[in-house]
Image: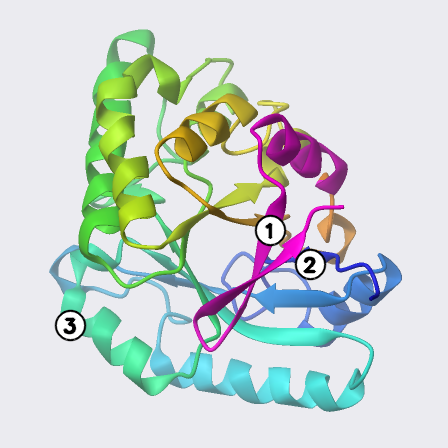
Amino acid sequence: MAKIIADYHMHTTFSPDGFDSPEAMCRAAMERGLTEIAVTDHFEFYQAGIFKDKPFTIENMLIQQRELDKCREMFSGKLTIRNGIEIGQPQCNKLAAEELMKAVPFDYVIGSVHKLHDLDLGLTEYPDENIPGLVEQNLSMLYDLADREDFDCLGHLDIIKRYAANKGKKIDLLDYKDQLEPILRRVAERGKGLEINTSGLRQAAKETLPSAKVLEFYRSLGGEILTIGSDAHKTADVAAGFDGALEAARAAGFRYLALYENRTPHFYPIG
């Protein structure tokens, strides 16, 4: 059996912050020796049902799906391309999230928290006195997502660590273990998973999201499902940092990673 190397988190020009087309991202995946990818363009939900950016429409996602179909024909037999999506804060608009899931046939859904209601974690400041409150709000929203929403894996669990590090501040979710534990336990109970997001390795955090220690805690609570994603927004970052992600998974005691088809996980050895 050929070695499986899969990148399960990447964005194209169908995301407002994506730089390269689906075809270009697929070609980059081929060049990196990947066998499978999930294209997971953004779809953000906001309070009061407001879509603040034009790409966050079902129509845009259906156009993206047609582009992925063209890529499947182009790379047939060479690269498996899964229909993915990264949904941000779906609990902010449950009806719209349900409508999206019914309208588009996804293989894989990342559930993420990028915003505390309408406060973007990437655009806020991190003065020392505000950090505990921001982390606690973030964990509260992550629990709501893990507890009730429709997703397959939680994305970049401690992305707040990445953004704080970019401002010279250090955040470790294990310092908030009482709030973190029910999130990870609920993920495991529901048969959901976590992703190991490698974007932190190429930014100031210099660590996977989450860290090997958090992954070990997740495993101790019954967690079994892991995917790896580069969170690439351009071709240069496809599959970046995968050695570090595999090292973190092994260090936490995991021996298998997951692939998804029709929202169902299938497992393969890390190797």
Where are the magenta residues, as a range?
A: 242-271
Task: Quarter of the image for the N terminus: give it.
Answer: bottom right
Sort mark 2 into few (<14), some (14-19) or many (20+) by Cα contacts within 10 Å: many
Task: Indicate the position of residue 217 as horizontal and vertical percent values.
Answer: 41, 26
The amino acid on which the numbered mark 2 sits, given as a three-letter code, is Ala
Residue 24 location, quadrant: bottom right
User: SS for tag 3?
Assistant: helix
Q: Which residue was labeled with disc 3?
A: 95
Task: Indicate the position of residue 97 as horizontal and vertical percent values.
Answer: 25, 70
Which dot marks residue 257?
1
The amino acid on which the numbered mark 3 sits, given as a three-letter code, is Leu
Task: Indicate the position of residue 111 as horizontal and vertical percent values.
Answer: 36, 54
Q: Which residue was labeled with disc 2?
A: 6
For the point 25% across and 43% down, the residue is 186
User: SS for tag 2?
Assistant: strand
Q: Nearer the viewer, residue 218 or 239?
A: 218
Work out whether mark 3 precedes mark 2 in sequence or the reverse, and give the earlier one.
2
Work out whether mark 3 precedes mark 1 in sequence or the reverse, and give the earlier one.
3
Label 3, label 2: how far apart the Cα atoms are: 32 Å
Whether label 3 touches label 2, CB < 8 Å: no
- Would residue 46 be visible to someone looking at this image? no
For the point 76% across and 37% down, the residue is 243
Label 2, label 1: how far apart the Cα atoms are: 9 Å
* In the image, residue 189 above or below residue 59: above
The amino acid on which the numbered mark 1 sits, given as a three-letter code, is Leu
Q: Is residue 19 left or right of residue 157?
A: right
